[in-house]
Amino acid sequence: MADPYDTDLHDQAIQLPYRQLLASLHYAFPTTVFIYYAISQGIAVCTLQTKSAAYDHPRRRVIAWLLMLGIITYFTQLSNLVVHAVLLNRFPPADQDIIIGLLSNALVFGVEFVGLSDTEKPVWYPFTGSIWLALAFEPFIQFLSLKARPAKSLAFTEIFDISVVGVRYLFLVSALVLYYEGVWSSRQEKGTDSERQSLLKSNGQSTGHVSHDSDPEDQSERNQVNGYGGTAASSDSDSSTDASQSPTTDQVESPWERRERQANEAMEKRLKEKGNWVTYAKSFLIFFPYVWPVNQRSLQIRVVLVGVCLLFMNAINVLIPRQLGIIIDCLSGTNARNPWTEVMIFAGLKLVASEAGLSLLRQWLWIPVEFYSFDAMSTAAYSHVLNLSSDFHDTKSSSDIMMAIQSGQSISNILESICFRAFPMLIDMTVAFIYLSVTFGPYEGFITIATAAVFLYIATHMIGRLKTARRGEVSAWFKEHYVRQAGIQGWSTVTCFNQVGHEEARYSEAVKDRVAKSQTVYFGYVLAYAFQFLVLLSGLLAGAFLAVYQVTHDQATPGQFIMLLTYWAQLVAPLTFFAGLGKSISRDLIHAEQLLEIMQTKPTVKNKEGAGPLHFKAGRVRFDHVSFSYDKKKEILKNINFEATPGMTVAFVGATGAGKSTILKLLDRFYDVTKGSIQIDGQDIRDVDLFSLRAQIGIVPQSPILFDDTIMNNVRYARLTATDEEVYEACKAASIHEQILGFTDGYQTRVGERGIKISGGELQRVAIARAILKRPAIVLLDEATSAVDTETEQKIQEALRVLCEGRTTFIVAHRLSTIMNADRIIVVGGGEIVEQGSHEELISRKDGKYAELWSKQIFVKPKDKEASTKDDKQTGKGRKAPNIVNDLTPEATNSELAKVKSKPVLSAQPNGQQNNNSTESNQGSVADENSKPSGHKKEV
Ligand SMILES: Nc1ncnc2c1ncn2[C@@H]1O[C@H](COP(=O)(O)OP(=O)(O)OP(=O)(O)O)[C@@H](O)[C@H]1O
């Protein structure tokens, strides 16, 4: 058989330039196609084209398979060369550049094939561009191949080879034709659709025909218009992470999953707004001062030195395997170096690379930078959160906020992953590729690259496929946790209702379910790792066979073989890291997004530019046409007008949800009024410094929140500079001093979380003591005496009397007996002032709202006969209806009325002693008009 490569010297001289150019093209072809593909895919990802790609090409699968056929033609060419070489007994079968070229092309188009078949709606130009490049390179290479061959007639092998190239060309051209035909026909279809839609304008859905590419977007928009699940649906359509999936109704979403989903949705939304990853990444620049030590030169130098350490580490990673090879060569006599010296060098290199060497130095340099970042980020996030307004705190759960603050770490994680792990590892892998190619030739380099590509594909895909299983495991884990917690927390209910067996069975089922799902996940991981290992082993074997061949043919030394083995072992870590890099960065980004959202939130209540302090004079408070809405839609307060003169006590009463507490919140600027203004001593509270305003106001809330600290520290919180004596005085004034002394540890008693270890009445009095210690100029009491027994209430009233003495006071109360002595009572209904006046004025108004409330609280209305009969009928079967509400007969009511009317009620003495003439019920009291002191009364 004729050898087409057998040429004489003259021919060789003529063909040499063609051969050289051809060799370069064999390398340049796959390299160019790969670089184009990588860059264009990178651009598509960064500019979010991959996310918004909605075009489902009708011929995508056929085109992918045409690519696969093209790949098969490369292997056919290789087989042709091998068969020919076997027949001629001529090895190697062809020049290295030809074989590497064919293998590399197969690999590059293999990567594209995987990309095309795995993505339902790909961005097409990376693929079509690659095919166009191939169509440009192929004829050129063929032309040069013909030029570079001897001027003989074509051998069968050559004809076959050219035919295979021709067939491949046909495949590639067909792929392009199919692509453009598909695009064209889709456009035609779309045009027809829009024509039809313009005729049938109803709602865009009645056409009964929706084009391929418009469908998902339409769907997404429809979801958004509908409101329900709008964001989730849109993110589903273009998100690649599992966390973006909105929960289906039959799925329980754990708080963890909810947080992840919401953050992911926020990320998707922001990404869409920004238009590309680069602009999106820019929004994270607000974290720059916390990650980069801006004004700290020493820390900046440390960061630079860490970079230098990493470069040294890269060098060491090459030098260690190389040194091992040198030692082996010394020992096998391949080189004449002194093995002792070489071993010493090896030991030195190992020491430098060890935890006691460069790694230690790097950590020593890095730890202060890392802690700077942690410190700066946590304190900035915490401070930002504390300075945000009520609307933010009302809408976010405290656990979400705390999670977000902790997420600061993920921003440093992302930077660390990229700068200190990904880059050095990329350098390591590039160096490995070059070094192995130089030492063992391009085949070894190719094996390294091919193994890395297959490894990364398998690793990312197998781990990606575990997403659903992992999600199921998390849900099952949450369910197990929920069942356990419910059983333990509700132990008394479980026991009372004899449901111990039921709870045991429920928990056992939950545990079994979780264990089964965990096993699936673990097995999946084990399988994925096994496959990854097999890929690496195959690569290593191929590389090792090649090296053994070269060693046995004196083209390499045994030492180089050992070097190869050591180098391969070192490559496993970077490859595994890269396989998980995308996932870990996207997870960190999702967490960082939570913090970013908070850091970008601006306080709605803030100081005006140049706002001066509040000049408090006497405490005249004026609500001037105040309206307010929490959500800017529904008005909660409408046109509230009143004025409180200095020292006056104003009480707000009315139905629950009427807006009473909201009035107090506006005064303390927890929110700003939507319309009108609130003035203190003639100054609009929005124009004064917020701190100076709040310094003048003392609040006793309905449910005071104490810190899990000692009573002493809790009271002192109102004024951190107060002495122990001042705290005692405040507690005495709040009638709680004696009680505190009775506690085991007195003032050092810890009150437990939110004050759980002390009773409701004690808690309220501690809160009053705190307000007294603050010495506020204006006092706000929001149902400060709710939910305590009568005796405690009397004590609290005493304490309040001390607190409110001489101060403008606003009280919200449901029990009218506690506010009947107020200077003005304002009845609020539906966010408006229904009526106002003193107690006497208001109860004397016939059909007045206050009079009605008062009578309801004092006299339980007689049950009418009709209702009574109805109740009896409803219970049926002759059983007696429970007689527990409104059951006073008219006679009994009259006698109660007579009793109440004959006695004065709750008129506190100036010296703080309780008026013995008072009569109280849990419902309320009526004052004896004669016994009521005149003028401004602070008794409340
Ligand atoms: N942070 C908030 N965000 C949105 N709406 C709120 C908020 N706080 C209160 N509301 C709504 O404002 C209305 C008035 O609430 P407010 O607490 O002022 O009533 P209230 O008269 O003090 O009731 P109660 O006597 O039960 O304490 C209610 O309908 C309530 O649902």
Image: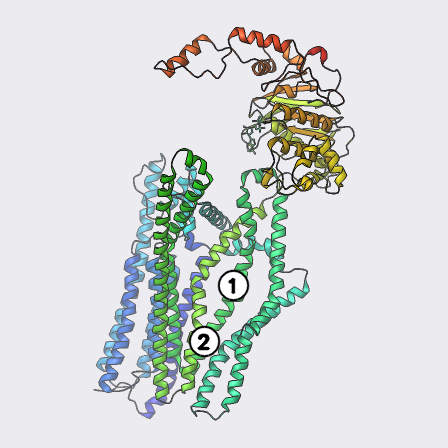
Way the structure is coloured: rainbow
Label 1 Cα neighbours within 10 Å, binned few <14 / some 14-19 / many ≥20: some
Which residue in the structure is indicated by mark 2?
Answer: 432
Nearer-the-camera pick, 520 or 552: 520
Q: Amino acid at mark 2?
A: Ala
Residue 2 placement: quadrant: bottom left
Mark drawn on residue 695: none
- N-terminal-most mark, 1 or 2: 1
Q: Is residue 707 above or below residue 69?
A: above
Task: From the viewer's perspective, tell me whether residue 724 is left or right of residue 48.
Answer: right
Q: Position of residue 723 (x, y in %)?
A: 76, 41
> Helix, strand, or loop for circle 2?
helix
Task: From the viewer's perspective, tell me whether residue 253 is left or right of residue 154.
Answer: right
Q: Mark 2 vs ligand 1: CB under 8 Å?
A: no
Nearer-the-camera pick, 909 or 636: 909
Q: Amino acid at mark 1?
A: Ile
Label 2 Cα neighbours within 10 Å, binned few <14 / some 14-19 / many ≥20: many
Q: Position of residue 242 (x, y in %)?
A: 40, 51
Residue in the image at 51% along x and 85% along y? 343
Q: Is residue 27 above or below residue 797?
A: below
Res 218 visible: no
Which residue in the structure is indicated by mark 1?
Answer: 418
Residue 41 placement: quadrant: bottom left
Q: Is residue 482 above or below residue 793?
A: below
Nearer-the-camera pick, 853 or 261: 853
Q: Position of residue 835 (x, y in %)?
A: 63, 17
Task: From the viewer's perspective, tell me whether residue 47 is left or right of residue 8.
Answer: right
Quarter containing the N terminus: bottom left
> Helix, strand, or loop for circle 1?
helix
Work out how far the residue at label 1 is from the one at label 2, CA to CA, in angstroms.
20 Å
Residue in the image at 42% along x and 70% along y? 572
